[in-house]
Image (cartoon, rainbow, N blue to C red):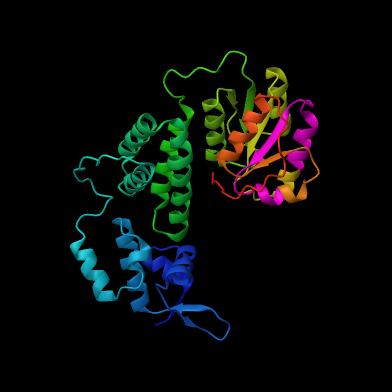
Amino acid sequence: MLVPIQVASQRSGVTAHVIRIWERRYGALEPVRTGTNRRLYGDEQIRRLQLLRQLTECGHRIGNIATLGLLELARLLQDGGTTVSKATPREPMPPCESAPQYLEACLQAVTDFDSDGLRQLLHRSRIQLGQRCLLVRVIAPFIQELGRRWQDGSVRTGQEHLGTAVVREVLLAPPPGHQPRPGSPEIIVSTPAGELHEIGALLAAATARDLGWQVTYLGPNLAPEEIAACARARQARAVALSLVCPEQPDSMLQQIQELRQLLQPHCVLIVGGRASSPCRQALENLPVHWVTDLPALDDLLIRLEHDLEPTRSTPWTRRIAD
């Protein structure tokens, strides 16, 4: 009996969104198509979805198992041992020597639901590699890859939340012994009202702090007048906003315009993040500085601190998720 994707989703435990991704990106399934191009699934395909879901929950990458046959998937599940959701003794984490090794170990800790292990890895990489490398080469790509794996269904929502929560905790805590330089400029960091994703803003705050700036982090989801009031009270040199996936882009554009009007002329408005490009095109003539990665933010803050003219049209290409 053939059933539509909604029924296949209920019976397999895989969301319809993930089913479509597994089909298009990995060729995991070939559903029957009706005359109106609707997907239909048989019992064998639903069983296949169940096996793929169970194996990804055990830590297998969907890209490695998507094209295996039913018997191979069943045998792999039988040989795979206990799933990661059950309590098992954790082996000691292997030593890491480089940022790519730390990145891979952090992703494995998320797969294992090992929040303590992830926290230890991030603290250890800060000590071994330094704060700058931790931000640019470990945390930023970790968050990006975590989001990608969640999108394709190889990471569960709980695992993604665990990883994000630990990163937030680490970024909120300044490095031990850190003190801003006397007389250093101040930056206010937040996200516009309606933007709840804050990792990009936390990365921006940590970057500024690492450069010796005084940082006031207001948290996410704040109206322009509240951000501007803080900037005026603190006589801030800059305000930084992070945009990730605004559901109402017109509202975001309006908020950026309003905030720029409320800020004092000497206060620079910086906007960055995954969703900043459309806003940049719409507000090209507004005195706003657009950044799409941490090195670009580095360069801008250094220029501002030394009263150099910031460059607004540098073609940055490396992008950072938040």
Which residue is at the front of the view, 138 or 240?
Answer: 138
Q: How many marks?
A: 0
Which residue is at the front of the view, 186 or 11?
Answer: 186
Quarter placement of the N terminus:
bottom left
Give coordinates of residue 112: x percent, y percent: 30, 47
Residue drawn where x is 43% and y is 45% of the image: 142
Give coordinates of residue 278: x percent, y percent: 70, 52
Residue drawn where x is 74% and y is 29% of the image: 225
Which residue is at the front of the view, 173 or 135?
Answer: 135
Give coordinates of residue 154: x percent, y percent: 39, 58
**Is 316 a magenta residue?**
no
Q: Is residue 111 above or below residue 127?
A: below
Instruction: Give left or right: position of 223 versus 54.
Output: right
Q: Residue furthest bottom?
A: 35
Residue drawn where x is 65% and y is 50% of the image: 247
Instruction: Give left or right: position of 5 versus 293.
Output: left
Q: Is residue 268 above or below residue 82?
A: above
Instruction: Give left or right: position of 252 versus 96.
Output: right
Report which quarter residue 273 is drawn in.
top right
Report which quarter residue 118 is drawn in.
top left
Report which quarter residue 186 is drawn in.
top right
**Is 258 a magenta residue?**
yes
Give coordinates of residue 174: x percent, y percent: 47, 24
From which residue to which does the magenta span run? 254-279
Q: Is residue 228 above or below residue 6?
A: above
- Residue 193 visible in image: no
- Residue 87 visible in image: yes
